[in-house]
Amino acid sequence: MPIVSASTGLHETLALLTSQLHPDANHKEDLVFLRDVFSEKSISYLMKIHEKLRQYEKYSPTPVLHSASCLAEDLAEELQSGALQEDERELLLLLSTPHLKAVLSAHDIVAQKKFDPVLPPLPEDLDDDFEEESVKIVRLVKNKEPLGATIRRDEVTGAVIVARIMRGGAADRSGLVHVGDELREVNGNLITHKRPEEISQILSQSQGSITLKIIPAVAEEDKLRESRAYLRALFDYTPFEDKATPCQEAGLPFRRGDILQVVSQEDATWWQAKKVGDCNLRAALIPSTQFQERKSHEREGVEYHFISRAAFEADIQNGKFIEFGEYKENLYGTSLESIHKVLNQNKVCLVDVQPEAMKTLRTAEFKPFIIFVRPRICDGQRKYFGSSSSDLCNSEPFFTCSHQDDDLLEMRQSAEKMDECYGHWVDYVLVKEDPVSALEELQNVLERVQTEPQWVPVCWVRR
């Protein structure tokens, strides 16, 4: 890489950095963004002005006098009062030129530090209720990425308002656009009478630099902080299939089991999040916990233990069992005390329970690792057992195959129902090929659980 010397200008350094940017598959959009920013002519001009100002501050020149224009006028009057020689005539002509007068006037303004413009006085009949809207022009540089903001129309005033800013997007990185700002123009086009869908299309089609005319919202103390909440997805989500989402293009699709980092909970119903491990730094919308549906089967008392029938029934009422049942008029169950007894011996307690019992076990008290053992049912097996009786007349009776086919169908449906109802609580799915391989896989999983970090609900570790 070429060496940058101390005398190298800032704009030259930026040009050198641009030439040294190499493609990276993981940060392709970021590199394109940097190239676009560094190649802007306005940035180059600003850097040159910055260098000149730094040079001025370095040497700190002081004016010899603060009224060079008055001195030049006095000298011109004195020269005109008498006979002039050739050099004096040339000096008088030079002092009377407009360009030199302008240079001396600029010198005096800088020397006297008259930088602020002189504004006319306010009219005496100014209305006290008059409020002047402060307008700011914002210029953003973006590539093919979206702007990273959603808009809405105010139902009372009809103004186009910035509804939310997506974390990591172009608008968020600029720090110039905020929630509540009123949008007036896009690239010089008035958008106050356009529908939000039309405005979104204009914003998405704008490439390179985009200029916005904005009326800032009332400044408020920023009470929001970067969220550090992590969630594990309990279901699949496709924003383009969700009619409730405020902006389908801004939604974040995810699969059950994905780990999501929530970066903003400003909106009570739609949070901003990004997938853990995803190289894309921009956040997107996900439904908040307000959309969480209450489960009708969630109820107290699904626990068990057994002793005498009266004591057993009393313990059931006191919630001392994780599950219980009755067989031939005998109550049976697994007590919480028996699990604690195994854990207190510093052993791993392996419990085979009905799916309904997971609600009781999946707490900070036990911190379980839940494994769903499901059979492998190949389509070839079902095709075989679903064949006609004439194809199977040489092997087994038809009623036997039909019975086995019904068992496989029931087994598959049972597994699918368990996955649908309780799959969001499962940490690992073990597909049983045969008892030997299943046992080996189970041992490997249990070993990894004890040696590798796992994603768990935050309430399990928070004290």
Image (cartoon, helix red, strand yellow):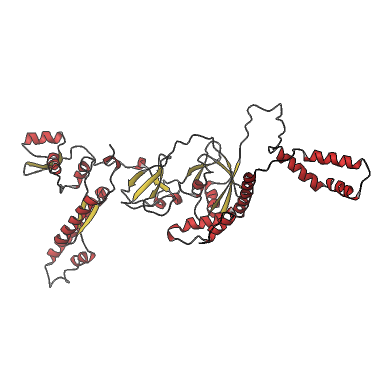
**Nearer-the-camera pick, 67 or 28:** 67
**Nearer-the-camera pick, 156 or 129:** 129
Q: Position of residue 40 (x, y in %)?
A: 59, 55
**Which image quarter holds the C terminus?**
top left
Residue at position x 49%, y 57% in the image: 31
Residue at position x 54%, y 37% in the image: 217
Q: Position of residue 343 (x, y in %)?
A: 15, 43
Locate residue 115 relative to residue 202 in the image: left or right.
right
Residue at position x 79%, y 40% in the image: 69
Residue at the extreme right: 83
Residue at position x 6%, y 38% in the image: 307
Residue at the extreme bottom: 394
Q: How many marks?
A: 0
Q: Position of residue 170 (x, y in %)?
A: 50, 49
**Nearer-the-camera pick, 373 or 408:** 373
Examine the rendered structure and indicate whether residue 103 appears above or below residue 443.
Answer: above
**Nearer-the-camera pick, 123 or 120:** 120
Place residue 74 in its image quadrant.
Answer: top right
Place residue 270 in its image quadrant.
Answer: top left
Q: Position of residue 311 (x, y in %)?
A: 8, 34
Evaluate whether residue 414 shows in this view. no
Evaluate whether residue 43 shows in this view. yes
Examine the rendered structure and indicate whether residue 332 appears above or below residue 415.
Answer: above
Locate residue 78 relative to residue 223 in the image: left or right.
right
Locate residue 425 relative to residue 336 in the image: left or right.
right
